[in-house]
């Protein structure tokens, strides 16, 4: 039962509350405690008055909320609220000490409780934790989050966050200055892995040419006796995921200090006493050398033990086949016939049946061979003319392929397998038991450095390459172990930093002796994670204990977290055991950290005010006042103001392939350039900031576009601190004002071209590219975009509105003064109109839909008839209305109706939309005619 904890105790000493819940619980598993804690705190702060008493993190108050160094966590770790954008979800899952003994009592390490161990200086305390039982460990997901980018002062105040002052606090400055990226000395492994992949790709292509499947097999980089730093470099810089080890203890040690997402393959011989060690590796992906029922039973017992690491799925296994018949090699004899009578004594068949029917913690996934060295060296892929010829080039490969075919057929006909009716068997081996494919879902693992080309062309699913990926190994295992000893103790990055510190002792001593933070140290790992690093903000780690809920959060998602505030090191290796002494002179860079009691997604427009209403927009006089306010920033042009209003409430409510319904990118052309860089912010941007919860200016000046340190897109250099933010990594619903008028003359370099491509992707396909060292991914984005340009924009847009301004200054020094109560009414009305839920709920009656179709068809027919008359009876499609015109008008009419506070479409609104669309067409035509009459005065001022 959740204890009735005092309200003030929950606010000021939340760790004590967590500990009491833990003490009272009968079930002390992480899942149960996490659920109980969340329920208790949600209930305690369920009312608005109670919730308002939780302090919200902001640049103004973080210095007073952060726990002081060497303080008692129980009395200084405060309950806080953090409303922030998730910037990086790729920091992985970390292991921590979930419970520990102290003075005869059991304490939980959940929600930052393990901090008391890390800060202890008593070596006796640490000795209690030297040998950790796996039942004392638990997992949590680590993410990085930042204050809402582009959030104006009024929105911050509405969410109980103080407006950011220009001056910052020393605590925040110190935290930022102390945070620096740590990089490894460059190993050769990334380049070598890429070279191996290129060989595999070429072999796969050659295989296609001779008629094979032509697929690229999985590359397993055999890292035996190579240091963790070489593995980490291959993983981070070459995106290598699969690594193989021959020694169990070496794999266990490396897995502790290397990222959790690495997939480990055990490729050595399995000793009976090593089963528990293997089972302790949570990211052990595949055991490639299973060759006996005894070994299968050892693994089954170890994996089903309570001491085994938590796994999301059973352990994949390959059965090792001795295709060469050499006494020195492990593995079972191949199966040369699919005849059941001849194969009844096959050890390989009996082992496969045993794994399928008796080992639920294992999954049979294929067969493996090492083969004879002579066969590997003599096989050639160069002269092969057919698939049969390439397979027969290596007798070991030919025997393994035939063994798989026979094994699949025998298993399908096996009475023992057919009688096994456990649900997991039928589900896990559906391809094998019910499929018709000759492979039965079983993979082939064959091919190493000498013969990977032939193996690829022959259809291998898995190749193991060591020397070609990492270079020569150390001469002896002892030599290798001594060389990587420190890396295995503190992690590869910390070991590298120690080495650099030893090489530059004067710098280290000066830094250590100074009471002031080192101003020359790089705050890059802290500031580079903010899309707008020049603006005071809060950024830090979020540690989530509800692992299922954490999986649903994505980058740029806006969340509200209630948790316990602490500081923590930026992960240098995503898989690490916390709660033990660092033992290093180089501690990880410290940043704020919120241990989340609970977290949930929120909408950008969910203001802390009364329920929003569209009543203001439904009143014509009030709506006209809002349009006038916007027109004041556009030289009095009300048509342009109407379009700006529509663009700011446009939200994508349906995504189908490349079609994004609800989006509207607006280009306001004929927009003058600023007189100087100091007056670059437009009056329009200032007024939008008064109305909308997040507005970001994107200047197109060449120096910024070409600056490699100011990317518009997120990117990762493969360093320990993860993903760096780009200026366009923003919360959905953020309004982006792009000003082309600041571009000027000059050369657009490669960096600038990449930035423009990223911006174009956001404007056109509504996807933001994320750049990684050897790959690039696109993720959905939903940003409101207004492009300001002198001529027609070179960026993609949906609607162009040539500006017809009066004499007003487009770059005024300050926004026009409007009564605050009036602004609040507009903000609430816009918040309602901008909601994705409002967009999805909008209805188009069938009668109105039919009216639109009939009217559009009639208008199109009329235009075609007029064009026919003007061409002397010849039909012409030039300039006739088409599908794009209908889609544009439908986008306009939906937004026009929403901007009037309507919930469904009417024929009157359609008429207004058509009139607006025709007005725009006339403006564009007039602008084009005017440009044609003028002589071109200059060529394009930007070269690419």
Image (cartoon, helix red, strand yellow):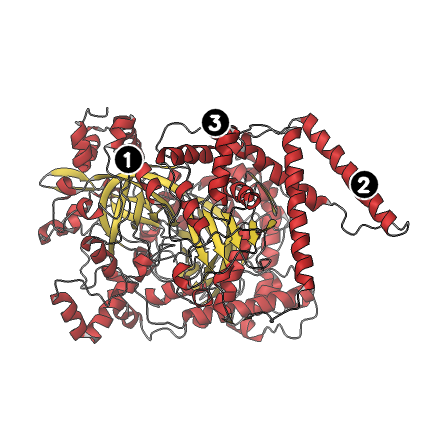
Query: Residues at badges 1 and 3 in contact (C-beta under 8 Å)?
Result: no
Q: Going by the picture, which residue comes out furthest to the right? A: 873
Residue 821 at x, y = what percent?
36, 33
User: Is 81 displayed left or right of 516 in the figure?
Assistant: right
The residue lying toward the viewer, choosing from 646 and 206, is 646
Does residue 207 appear to the left or right of 709 in the view shown?
right
Disc on res. 427 = none
Badge 2 element? helix
| Residue lying at 32% horizontally and 44% vertically, measured from the top left | 153
Q: Quadrant of residue 488?
A: bottom left
Q: How many C-alpha atoms fall within 10 Å of the one at disc 2: few (<14), some, or many (≥20)?
A: few
Residue that carries the numbered disc 2 in the rendered image: 862
Badge 2 or badge 1: first in the primary sequence: 1
Q: Please state which of the two labelled residues, at mark 1 or mark 3, is closer to the viewer.
A: 3
Position above or below: 343 against 161: below
Q: Residues within 10 Å of mark 1 (few under 14, many from 20)?
A: some
User: Image quadrant for the N terminus?
Assistant: top left
Badge 2 vs badge 1, beta-carbon distance below 8 Å = no
Image coordinates of residue 45 in percent, x first then y, are 27, 28
Q: Position of residue 13 (x, y in %)?
A: 16, 36
Q: Which residue is mark 3?
A: 615
């Amino acid at each position: 039962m959740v204890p009735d904890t005092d309200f003030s105790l929950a606010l000021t000493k939340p760790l004590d509350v967590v500990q009491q819940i833990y003490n009272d619980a009968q079930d002390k598993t992480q899942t149960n405690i996490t659920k109980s804690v969340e329920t208790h705190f949600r209930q305690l702060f369920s009312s608005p008055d109670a919730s308002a008493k939780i302090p919200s993190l902001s640049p103004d108050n973080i210095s007073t909320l952060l726990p002081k160094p060497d303080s008692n966590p129980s009395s200084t770790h405060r309950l806080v609220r953090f409303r922030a954008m998730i910037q990086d979800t790729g920091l992985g899952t970390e292991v921590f000490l979930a419970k520990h003994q102290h003075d005869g009592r059991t304490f939980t390490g959940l929600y930052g409780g393990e901090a008391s161990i890390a800060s202890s200086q008593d070596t006796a305390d640490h000795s209690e934790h030297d040998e950790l039982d796996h039942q004392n460990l638990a997992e949590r997901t680590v993410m990085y989050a930042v204050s809402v980018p582009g959030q104006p002062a009024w929105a911050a105040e509405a969410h109980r966050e103080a407006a950011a002052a220009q001056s910052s606090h020393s605590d925040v400055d110190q935290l930022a200055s102390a945070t620096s990226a740590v990089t490894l000395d460059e190993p050769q492994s990334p380049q070598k892995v890429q070279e191996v992949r290129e060989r595999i790709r070429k072999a796969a292509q050659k295989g296609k040419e001779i008629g094979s499947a032509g697929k690229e097999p999985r590359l397993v980089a055999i890292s035996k006796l190579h240091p963790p730093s070489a593995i980490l470099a291959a993983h981070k810089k070459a995106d290598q995921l699969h690594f193989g080890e021959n020694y169990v203890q070496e794999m266990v040690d490396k897995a502790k200090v290397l990222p959790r997402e690495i997939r480990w393959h055990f490729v050595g011989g399995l000793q009976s006493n090593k089963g528990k060690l293997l089972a302790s590796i949570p990211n052990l992906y595949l055991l490639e050398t299973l060759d006996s029922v005894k070994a299968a039973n050892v693994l089954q017992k170890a994996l089903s033990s309570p001491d085994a690491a938590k796994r999301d799925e059973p352990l994949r296994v390959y059965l090792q086949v001795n295709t060469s018949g050499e006494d020195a090699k492990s593995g079972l004899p191949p199966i040369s016939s699919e005849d059941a009578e001849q194969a009844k004594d096959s050890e390989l068949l009996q082992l496969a049946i045993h794994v399928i029917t008796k080992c639920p913690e294992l999954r049979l996934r294929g067969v493996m061979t090492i083969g004879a060295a002579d066969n590997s060296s003599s096989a050639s892929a160069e002269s092969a003319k057919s698939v049969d010829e390439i397979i027969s080039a290596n007798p070991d490969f030919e025997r393994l392929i035939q063994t798989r075919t026979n094994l699949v057929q025998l298993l399908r006909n096996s009475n023992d397998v057919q009688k096994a009716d456990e649900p997991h068997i039928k589900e896990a081996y559906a391809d094998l038991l019910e499929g018709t494919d000759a492979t039965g879902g079983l993979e082939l693992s064959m091919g190493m450095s000498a013969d990977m080309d032939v193996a690829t062309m022959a259809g291998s699913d898995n190749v193991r390459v060591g020397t070609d990926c990492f270079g020569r190994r150390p001469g002896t295992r002892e030599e290798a172990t001594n060389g990587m000893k420190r890396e295995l103790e503190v992690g590869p990055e910390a070991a590298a930093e120690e080495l650099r510190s030893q090489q530059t002792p004067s710098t280290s001593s000066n830094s250590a002796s100074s009471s002031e933070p080192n101003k020359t140290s790089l705050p890059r790992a802290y500031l580079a994670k903010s899309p707008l690093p020049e603006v005071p903000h809060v950024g830090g780690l979020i540690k989530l204990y509800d692992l299922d809920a954490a999986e649903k959060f994505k980058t740029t998602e806006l969340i509200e977290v209630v948790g316990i505030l602490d500081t923590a090191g930026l992960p240098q290796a995503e898989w690490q055991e916390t709660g033990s002494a660092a033992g290093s002179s180089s501690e990880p860079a410290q940043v704020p950290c919120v241990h989340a009691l609970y977290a949930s997604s929120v909408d950008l427009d969910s203001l802390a005010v009364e329920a929003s209403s569209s009543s203001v927009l439904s009143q014509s006089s009030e709506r006209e006042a809002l349009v006038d306010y916007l027109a004041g920033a556009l030289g009095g042009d009300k048509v342009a103001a109407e379009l700006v209003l529509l663009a700011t409430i446009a939200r994508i409510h349906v995504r189908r392939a490349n079609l994004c319904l609800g989006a509207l990118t607006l280009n306001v052309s004929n927009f003058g350039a600023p007189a100087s860089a100091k007056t670059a912010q437009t009056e329009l941007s200032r007024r939008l900031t008064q109305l909308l919860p997040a507005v970001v200016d994107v200047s197109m000046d060449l120096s910024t576009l070409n600056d490699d340190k100011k990317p518009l897109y997120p990117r990762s250099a493969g360093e320990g601190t993860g993903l760096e933010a780009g200026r366009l990594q923003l919360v959905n619903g953020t309004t982006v004002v792009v000003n082309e008028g600041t571009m000027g003359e000059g050369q657009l370099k490669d960096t600038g071209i990449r930035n423009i491509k990223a911006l174009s992707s956001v404007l056109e396909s509504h996807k933001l590219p994320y750049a990684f060292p050897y790959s690039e991914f696109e993720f959905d984005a939903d940003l409101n975009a207004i492009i300001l340009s002198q001529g027609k924009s070179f960026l993609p847009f949906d609607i162009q509105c040539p500006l017809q301004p009066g004499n007003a200054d487009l770059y005024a020094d300050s926004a026009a003064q409007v009564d605050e109560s009036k602004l609040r009414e507009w903000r609430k009305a816009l918040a309602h109109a901008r909601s994705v839920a409002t967009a999805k709920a909008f209805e188009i009656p069938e009668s109105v839909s039919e009216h639109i179709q009939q009217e559009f068809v009639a208008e199109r027919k009329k235009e075609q008839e007029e064009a026919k008359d003007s061409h002397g009876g010849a039909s012409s499609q030039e300039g006739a209305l088409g599908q794009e015109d209908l889609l544009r008008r439908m986008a306009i009419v939906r937004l026009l109706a929403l901007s009037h506070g309507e919930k469904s479409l009417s024929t009157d609104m359609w008429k207004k939309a058509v009139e607006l669309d025709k007005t725009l067409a006339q403006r564009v035509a007039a602008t084009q005619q005017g440009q044609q009459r003028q002589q071109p005065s200059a060529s394009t001022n930007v070269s690419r």
